[in-house]
Image (cartoon, helix red, strand yellow):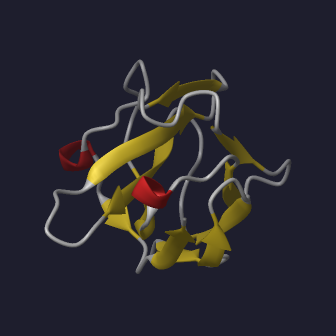
Amino acid sequence: QVQLVESGGGSVQAGGSLRLPCVVSGYTYSNTYMGWFRQAPGKEREGVAAIDFGLDRSNYADSVKGRFTISQDNAKTTLYLRMNSLKPEDTAMYYCAAGLNRWLPPPLSAGLYKYWGQGTQVTVSS
């Protein structure tokens, strides 16, 4: 059974940083991809970053390029999202997700992901 558990959310002032870990279990990493999504109240779920594990390729939404970094630990048990230079518009519930097979570039479309975590709230104040 695949389980994804996010943590690390919280409240931060604009310009600050957070790192979100997502602990993964029951998931086979080879030739697959994982991603981070966010959803603000009244808005659709938005893909912010994705990574292909086998090729170590990443993909980012334009709104977070240069500020967010997706990565994995060497043991491939934890996915991370490092968020720098946070803005009030980054405020949302953040979710990690896992897909099946390979898709290049790693997708930012929620419909291409099969497994989801429960989310962690990030609030950025001005």
Is residue 31 shown above or below 68?
A: above
Quarter placement of the C terminus: bottom right
Compared with 50, 59 (above or below) is: above
Say which quarter of the image contains residue 38. Answer: bottom left
Where residue 93 sits in the image (x, y, percent)? Answer: 40, 72
- Confirm whether residue 23 shows in the render: no
Front position in the image: 91 or 80 = 91
Count the numbered circles shown.
0
Corner quadrant of residue 103: top left
Identify the residue shown where x is 67% and y is 76%: 8
Residue 117 in percent (x, y) is at: 43, 73
Q: With 110 as the anchor, is 28 left or right in this view? A: right
Q: Position of residue 68 (x, y in %)?
A: 62, 41
Please state the horizontal and vertical placement of residue 74, each as a whole percent of the image: 86, 47
Q: Quadrant of the N terminus?
A: bottom left
Residue drawn 53% across the image and 61% down it: 27
Viewer-nearest residue: 64 or 36 = 64
Q: Which residue: 39% across, 35% down?
A: 101
**Residue located at (61% from left, 53% from top):** 86
> Could you tell me if residue 100 is visible in this image?
yes
- Is 126 situated above or below 59? below
Nearest the viewer among 104 and 90 is: 90
Q: Is residue 10 above or below residue 74?
A: below
Residue extending farthest to the right is 74
